[in-house]
Image (cartoon, grey):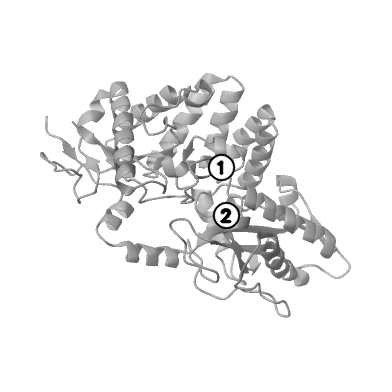
Amino acid sequence: MPNAAFSPPPARRAAEQGLVPLLLAALLLAGCAVPMASPSAPAGVAAPTREALPLDGAVVALAEAMLASTRDAVRPGTRRGIVIDPLIDRATGAETGATRSMETVIGRLVRERYPALELKPFTVASLDEQPLILLGAITRVQAPGSVVNAPGPSDTYRIWGVVGDLRSGTILARPMAWVRADTVDATPTAFFRDSPAWTDDVMQAAYLRTCSSLPGTRIDPAYLRGLRAQAMVAEAVGAYERGEMARARALYVAAEGEPGGQQARVLNGLYLTNWALGRRPEAEAAFGRLVGYGLSRNRLAVKLLFRPGGTEFVRDPGVSGPYPMWLRQIAAQAAGRESCLVVEGHASVTGSSEANDRLSLARAQAVRARLLREAPPLEPRSAAAGRGARQPIIGLGTDDMRDALDRRVEFLPGACPAQVAGLAGGVPGGVPGAVPAG
């Protein structure tokens, strides 16, 4: 039977055709990256230096510039509540050891140096008081003073944040600072380490757009609409990481029903908590919704861990035990769609490019074979591709849990415009390392 030709999602197809500069320009216009600008700070407050500092020192400079902007938002002789929407890694949306450390430093500064501010927990009850809100992110960049993200290992991180006023709906400040990479703990916290899947997420995008907003502009409306869900998710993540699975599950259930609650963190949380509580049918249903969410956004990355150098999954039942269910859900939902499916293998940035290409392709082929056993109709409209280390999300090269997403398998639905036989070593467009179905 002839193989069905298929097209990857539009963004990937553009990249393969050499349109990366145009895509980057579009992202900048859309506010998904911070524009080239000097760090902003209120009048009379020194902007953070462009020199790369140890993390704690950089956070102090950043926080002072942010918190000084709140003076005009507090009436004399009163106190104003302020909450922190947990800071994230820009590339993954995850909380890490570094972002948690940043929050600790900022909280200490609020308590010690800003008596007019009252640090409150990030909860729905606190939001009802229309407090000030602080959020921010961290990302690897090419050099101190640069806002150009680094695709691989780098000696420098950039941190930035905003303070917003929920009463006026405006941004008060958006400074940034630079950090020495050797002082940054990029390890994901437990919830994000345990989450099985990752995709481009609506609320993560809204959060980052808010982080990119200039002082005096409005807070992103999608972010504001999802704030109640954001607060519930933050509480749920905390409960999960304290081992309070029933409470975490209840919070994820509540968050899913809120505007902005249909997001990857909620669906990952429902899967994890139901699985931990022994609620296997509910866990599978949650994972199925997570698969559907990722495929509807044309990108689902799953943390399938393989034995070193091979195509077999790790033999630890605590790790790979759920994999058959994961693949069953992916196969069923992919087969039920009218699109074709690319199964992409990825590798960390360590090792030779040739070895990474071979291994990532072999793993993608092995996963595709498992999908076909679950859903044979996928055979003429699916393919395996090995991307090696060309598309890292983390890029640390640590080969541990910190860069697990770089060793991911992605499932990418795309159009099937025509049937083409005899594809020579790749899908239409000449993607290196791709193998047609069959």
Relative side of 23 to 384, left or right = right
Quadrant, the C terminus: top left
**Compared to 285, does 421 lie above or below?**
below
Relative side of 17 to 282, left or right = left
Q: What is the residue that sits farthest to the right in this orientation?
A: 77
Q: Position of residue 436 (x, y in %)?
A: 20, 38
Quadrant, the N terminus: top left
Mark 1 residue crowding within 10 angstroms, few (<14) / some (14–19) / many (20+): many
> Could you say which disc has been placed on residue 80 in the image?
none
Q: Position of residue 437 (x, y in %)?
A: 20, 34
Q: Which residue is mark 1?
A: 261
**Compared to 196, does 150 lie above or below?**
below
Q: Position of residue 73 (x, y in %)?
A: 75, 68
The mark tally for this picture is 2
Q: Quadrant of residue 376?
A: top left
Residue at x 63%, y 64% (from the top left corner): 162
**Element class at badge 1:** loop
Three-letter residue code for mark 2: Tyr
Q: Earlier in the sequence, mark 1 or mark 2?
A: 2
Residue 74 in view, yes or no: yes
Q: Which residue is mark 2?
A: 223
Relative side of 418 to 175, left or right = left
Mark 2 residue crowding within 10 angstroms, few (<14) / some (14–19) / many (20+): many
Q: What is the residue that sits farthest to the bottom in this orientation?
A: 44
Q: Nearer the viewer, residue 242 or 32?
A: 242
Q: Nearer the viewer, residue 397 or 394?
A: 397
Residue at x 63%, y 53% (from the top left corner): 87
Q: Nearer the viewer, residue 236 or 192?
A: 192
